[in-house]
Image (cartoon, grey):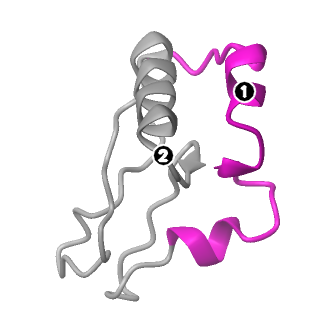
Amino acid sequence: MSTALDARRVSDLGDRILRPEDQGYDEARAIHNGLVDKRPALIVRCRTAGDVVAALALARDAGLDVSVRGGGHNVAGRAVATAA
């Protein structure tokens, strides 16, 4: 997996992206099962279909795994991917 991210494409998603160092990242990555502690490379809070397209293209081009979180209630922690 590559962790090289195109800065322009990341900035295109603006305030929708949370990185591990950003305020609110820990709250956004928390899921129902508190025993699961995964740390995704990025969290994108999509608001539109265009955001989804841009986020998936960014992940594909960077070789990142993608997880889609609805409610985050999967007891096994499969609602959130982790950075390798």
Report whether 21 appears left or right of 43: right
Instruction: Answer yes or no: is residue 21 visible.
Output: yes
Report whether 67 appears left or right of 38: left
Q: Out of 50 and 35, give the one closest to the viewer.
A: 50
Give the residue drawn at x 70%, y 54%. Answer: 20
Picture disc at residue 54: none
Secondary structure of the residue carrying numbered label 1: helix
User: Could you say where residue 37 lies in the image, as x and y percent from the top left?
Assistant: 45, 71
Examine the rendered structure and indicate whether residue 68 appears above or below residue 32: above
Q: Quadrant of the N terminus?
A: top left
Inter-mark Cα distance, 1 to 2: 13 Å
10 Å neighbourhood of mark 1: few (<14), some, or many (≥20)? some
Instruction: Answer yes or no: is residue 18 visible.
Output: no
User: Could you say where residue 32 lies in the image, as x and y percent from the top left?
Assistant: 34, 87
Give the residue drawn at x 29%, y 68%. Answer: 70
The picture quadrant where one finds residue 59 is top left
10 Å neighbourhood of mark 2: few (<14), some, or many (≥20)? few
Q: Assess whether mark 2 and mark 1 are in contact (beta carbons under 8 angstroms).
A: no
- Among numbered discs 1 and 2, the one appearing first in the sequence: 1
The picture quadrant where one finds residue 33 is bottom left
Give the residue drawn at x 44%, y 19%. Answer: 57
Residue labelled with disc 1: 12
Q: Tell whether position 17 is magenta.
A: yes
Which amino acid, by three-letter code, is at mark 1? Asp
Examine the rendered structure and indicate whether residue 61 appears above or below residue 47: above
Residue labelled with disc 2: 48
User: Could you say where residue 15 lies in the image, as x and y percent from the top left?
Assistant: 76, 49
Q: Tell whether position 8 is magenta.
A: yes
Residue depth check, mark 1 versus mark 2: number of the one nearer the observer: 2
In the image, the segment drawn in magenta is: 1-29
User: Could you say where residue 44 lies in the image, as x and y percent from the top left?
Assistant: 55, 48
Which amino acid, by three-letter code, is at mark 2? Thr
